[in-house]
Amino acid sequence: MHKKMLQRLALSALLLTGLPHMSGAAWAQSVPEIRVSVQEFRVTGNTLLPQSRIDEVLSPFKGERSLAELNAAATALQKLYRDEGYGSVIAYVPQQSGTAGVATLAVLEGRIQRVAVVGNQAAGEAVVRRSLPSLVEGVTPRLRSIDAEVQLANENPARQVAVSLEAGAAPGDVQANVSVSESPASRWTLGLDNTGNAGTGRLRANAGYQHAGLWDLDHVLSMQFQTSPEKLDSVRVFSASYRAPLYGAGLMLDLFGAYSDVDGGTTSTVAGPLQFSGKGEVLGMRLGGQLHRSGELLQRWAVGLDHRAYLNNCAIAGLPAGACGTAGESVTVRPLSLEYQLQWAGDAPMALQLNLARGLDLGGGHAGEASFTAVRPGAKPDYT
């Protein structure tokens, strides 16, 4: 995707440079080689870059310069726009004003004249365009922003988009083409496997539901339930998640929760019949986004906050409470986490993920130091 978009933008630039009044080469053929003293560069047409960045790039071209060197200055200026992601901007040497010591460079900032959306059936054009906020008529497209928006939009499981840019009918016009491929936004899933055990039943039945187009905002709701067909009262696991893309900010918000209630029944041991059951609950959120992309190298970050309660009940017939040791203890953890992911999306995909978590000592049931020590001696609620 990234390479194709870059090729489209480069093509747009080549098409835009085909204007006769921009050809420095033609001027050079008709005018004898001369050198001029350049003490100042005056750039017209720029609205995108700070003047300090432009001055920094053009400073080496001051002094006695030929027309070829002035064209080189324009090329350097155009490269500055490319490096900032503005592939449809052209810099050139226009007819000079004749002011002593001043060389003028002109900038043509190609602007989106039309956005064409094709292939969408379920989602309206407004929904698709909301996911690509950089594609606005009258605005110079920035490849870096468009690429990040496409990645974020394509995290929706029901829709994928691709963007290409091409030259419009008039000089400086750019047309943005958005192609859309869709799958059903609402879906059910059913599953059956043998991942259980003898105590709770060998089989596990799963049912799930997902809707990936809530409120026409690309919000995604997912729900799942799991049980044991052989022992319905022994296994009950519920989970749900809600994902909300914040397209304007380039962020993704995830909320999730889960509840489990598993009764392991009675197991014969050398110490006597052992009864074990456990309940758990998880609530959490993640807020994440993308960092600067370099070619096929992707970077992501996320900050999260979780509440996880592990409530265990263990007893051995004929023995006092606590005979199960740490296996029967309950604990609640509330980690604040920071995640970083580095992913290579080339021919041999690779990924590196780093996680840093800090436990928050907020008190409450099974969240104090005594509960942590019971589970593992020396453990503390404010762990890292």
Image (spheres, helix red, strand yellow):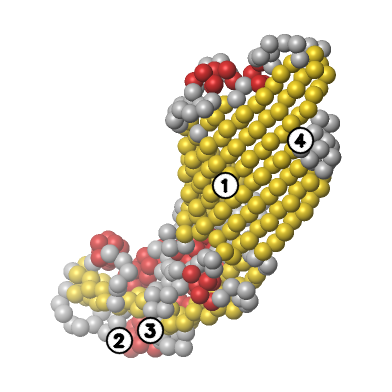
From the viewer's side, name the closer residue of 178 and 2: 178
From the viewer's side, name the closer residue of 362 and 140: 362
Mark 2 or 3, nearer chain start: 3
Foreground disc of the pair 2, 3: 3
Read off the residue under disc 4: 234
The disc at residue 23 is: 3
Q: Locate residue 290, reporting x and y percent.
A: 48, 53
Residue 33's place in the image compared with 206, above or below, is below
Q: Are marks 1 and 4 in contact (CB under 8 Å)?
A: no
Label 2 vs label 3: CA separation? 13 Å
The disc at residue 367 is: none
Foreground disc of the pair 4, 3: 4
Side (left or right) of 341 relative to 234: left
Q: Residue at x 60, y 37 (%)?
A: 281
Read off the residue under disc 1: 256
Q: Residue at x 65, y 33 (%)?
A: 279
What amino acid type is highlighted by mark number 1?
Phe
Read off the residue under disc 2: 31
